[in-house]
Image: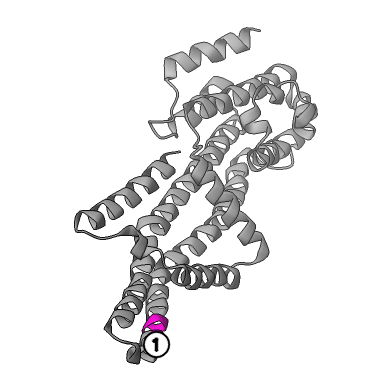
């Protein structure tokens, strides 16, 4: 919810400063300017985005507003899941993993870790990485290249909504000028009605320029930065999977493969090493 808090701070600071100088907030309420700016922005998004990108823009924006980012708990769950999967492969042979990987929704292990099970992209990436290991159709040294290629494709796809948001942010100041010019045209057509009417229309026109710049730098650019951070977090989740699975495929012990993945994480989401090792050993003892 921090994004909402930040938006409120932006609005409060802007209106507060305006009112301190004697301004009246009601003067900024110009419906026509909002219609022009909002309508053009919507049109820009529709023109620039295929249907699937439009859906992703909406999905990622809602996710950013909710403010749910991956934390230490989610990464800890992932590492525990990986360890349990690897332990089964080590104790019972890789073929024993087939029932879990081919039908994860009914796997007793996957069901324990909903942050992976209920996230289609993560679940698919993990299972796609484990299937070649189970089948033995690929050399362990080649698995990293395979998973990295898939990760690069997903990263490129995830950036499409970011480009759309950035396009809107970059366009908004100019869109505000368009709204202002339309207002000036109206002003010129009403110049014979006297200074009072002309003054009101000029103020309304200038509001268009203000709104364009205000929304661009107060909301859209920060939103783009938040979406980028969320995408980076999702990518780190997948990289963690890749590090662990590739290590296990090369013959590393489950604990070692998981430790390599843990060390690849940023410090603020990285589980404590000794504590995690203790929890993993407790899982392995069951």
Quarter residue 266 falls in: top left
Above-or-below relation of 275 to 93: above
Residue 209 lies, in percent from the top left, at 35, 72
Q: Residue at left 25%, top 58%? A: 18
Residue 278 lies, in percent from the top left, at 50, 11
Find the magenta span and give its range.
181-186
* Depth order, front residue of 88/199: 199
Residue 99 lies, in percent from the top left, at 80, 27
Above-or-below relation of 78 to 188: above
Q: Is residue 48 left or right of residue 205?
A: right
* Magenta: main secondary structure: helix
Q: Secondary structure at mark 1?
A: helix
| Residue 235 visible from this viewpoint | no
Q: Which residue is mark 1?
A: 185
Q: Residue at left 74%, top 33%? A: 134
Q: Is residue 82 left or right of residue 162?
A: right
* Depth order, front residue of 35/60: 35
Residue 11 lies, in percent from the top left, at 35, 51
Q: Where, quadrant-wise, is the C terminus in this rendering?
A: top right
Q: Is residue 244 left or right of residue 218?
A: right
Q: Residues within 10 Å of mark 1 (few under 14, many from 20)?
A: few
| Residue 262 visible from this viewpoint | yes
Q: Residue at left 74%, top 42%? A: 137
Q: Is residue 182 magenta?
A: yes
Above-or-below relation of 245 to 146: above
């Amino acid at each position: 919810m921090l994004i909402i808090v930040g938006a409120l701070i932006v609005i409060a600071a802007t209106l507060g400063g305006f009112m301190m100088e004697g301004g009246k907030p009601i003067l900024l309420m110009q419906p026509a300017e909002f219609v022009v700016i909002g309508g053009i922005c919507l049109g820009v998004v529709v023109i620039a985005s295929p249907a699937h990108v439009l859906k992703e823009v909406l999905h990622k924006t809602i996710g950013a507003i909710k403010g749910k980012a991956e934390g230490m708990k989610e990464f800890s769950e992932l590492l525990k899941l990986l360890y349990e999967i690897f332990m089964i492969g080590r104790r019972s042979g890789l073929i024993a993993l087939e029932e879990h990987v081919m039908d994860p929704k009914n796997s007793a292990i996957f069901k324990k870790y909903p942050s992976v099970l209920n996230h289609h992209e993560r679940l698919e990436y993990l299972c796609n990485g484990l299937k070649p290991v189970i089948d033995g159709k690929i050399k362990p040294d080649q698995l990293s290249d395979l998973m990295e290629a898939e990760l690069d494709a997903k990263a490129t796809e995830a950036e499409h909504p970011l480009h759309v948001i950035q396009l809107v942010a970059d366009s908004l100041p100019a869109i505000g000028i368009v709204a202002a010019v339309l207002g000036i045209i109206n002003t010129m057509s009403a110049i014979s009605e006297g200074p009072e009417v002309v003054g009101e229309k000029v103020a309304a026109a200038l509001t268009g320029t203000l709104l364009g710049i205000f929304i661009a730098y107060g909301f859209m650019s920060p939103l783009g930065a938040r979406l980028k951070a969320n995408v980076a977090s999702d990518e780190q989740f997948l990289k963690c999977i890749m590090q662990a699975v590739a290590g296990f495929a090369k013959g590393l012990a489950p604990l070692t493969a998981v430790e390599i993945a843990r060390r690849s994480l940023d410090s603020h989401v990285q589980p404590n090493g000794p504590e995690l090792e203790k929890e993993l050993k407790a899982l392995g003892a069951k």
